[in-house]
Amino acid sequence: MTKPTGSRASADRLARLLNLVPYLLARPGVEIAQAAADLGTTDRQLREDLELLWVCGLPGYGPGDLIDMAFDGDRVTITYDAGIDRPLRLTPDEALALVVALRMLAETPGLAGRDAVERALAKIEDAAGELAGAPVAVRLAGDPERLDRLRTAAQSGRAVRITYYTATRDETTERTVDPIRVLMIGGRGYLEAWCRRADAVRLFRADRIDALVELDEPAAVPPQAGRAEPRETAFQPTADLPVVTLRVGRGGRWITEYYPCDRVEVEPTGDWLVTLRVTDLAWARRFVLSLGADVTVTAPAELVAQVHAAAAQALAAYAAPAPEPAAYADPVPGQETSAAAPVGTG
């Protein structure tokens, strides 16, 4: 186990010392070995912490201002606490982060040990009190029922036919896949499966699976199919993907927080020159067009031409005159006519 060093070690020790005094106040005469076990440290570390506490206290730092304690063999008692008589409390940000994380975990379909998570959540909310703020509602992206069905298919070992929307190519396809497992990446559910169409392992976002049918045939995952490594985002750029360079204004800087970037440079004008890899240029074209005037493509030239052509086509559609509405004749009394029949039609 690697020991923390530098500022991390100092922060850990400070937290331990601030909690140590209230612990000892509540247990006068506790054995050092028992205290070390309760606090998850060693006898030697605890004795070093006690020696440091002995020279800590209120400003002025005279003998009457410092933390004082009495030893009786291997037992210790705090006789003066210098005001450090309460354990650390969570800050509002810390309380909210813990509550959101636990609620996210509790909402994960198929989670084992959900009762333990809910008990821990209840204890933290009770301990945090008003610090946790208003009740937090967490809903995972995608249909929880669909995630449960995907998880069931993966556990039962049956192949699945899915209708899937591929955002990078803006198309919907039908595929037969052999489920491996269901993953949660970045708060979204994914089915990891062997795709018979791609002849490779693929991740399918659960909320983009429009239809799902379990087949009678067993899943046939090839032996060479490996599992995806744990990751924070589903998209992992590789060296073989196209490189795109964008000039980004203030309103588009958020893309650097949501997409992996190779390089971000600040230009004298204040714009950012962002270089990133994309799955294909068709996706990049739609992505850039969706950002409007906040982003300008500088490379590659092929993408510049595609964006220019698409923008020109859109502008031309706005410039085209609207078709004249068809004229309709008033019906002749006593003659049956269709109310939607334009003049001149037979």
Image (cartoon, helix red, strand yellow):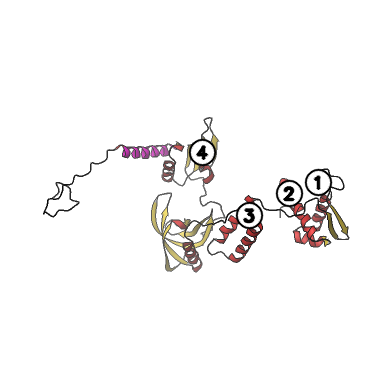
Q: CA distance from mark 3 to mark 4?
A: 42 Å
Q: Amino acid at mark 1?
A: Leu
Dot 2 or dot 3, earlier in sequence: 2
Q: Amino acid at mark 3?
A: Glu
Q: Amino acid at mark 4?
A: Val
Q: CA distance from mark 2 to mark 1?
A: 23 Å
* Nearer to us in this view, 320 or 328: 328
- Of circles 2 and 4, which is in front? 2
- Of circles 2 and 3, which is in front? 3
Rendering quarter of residue 28 = bottom right
Chain part drawn in magenta: 300-318
The reply to whether residue 226 is in sight is no
- Of circles 3 and 4, which is in front? 3
Q: Position of residue 282 (x, y in %)?
A: 41, 45
Neighbours of disc 3 within 10 Å: few (<14), some (14-19), many (20+): few
Q: Along the horizontal axis of the image, is 79 left or right of 316?
A: right
Q: CA distance from mark 2 to mark 4?
A: 37 Å
Q: Which element carries disc 3, helix, strand or loop?
A: helix
Dot 4 or dot 1, earlier in sequence: 1
Quarter of the image for the N terminus: give it: bottom right
In the depicted structure, whether residue 53 falls above or below residue 309 = below
Mark 3 sits on what residue? 130
Dot 2 or dot 4, earlier in sequence: 2
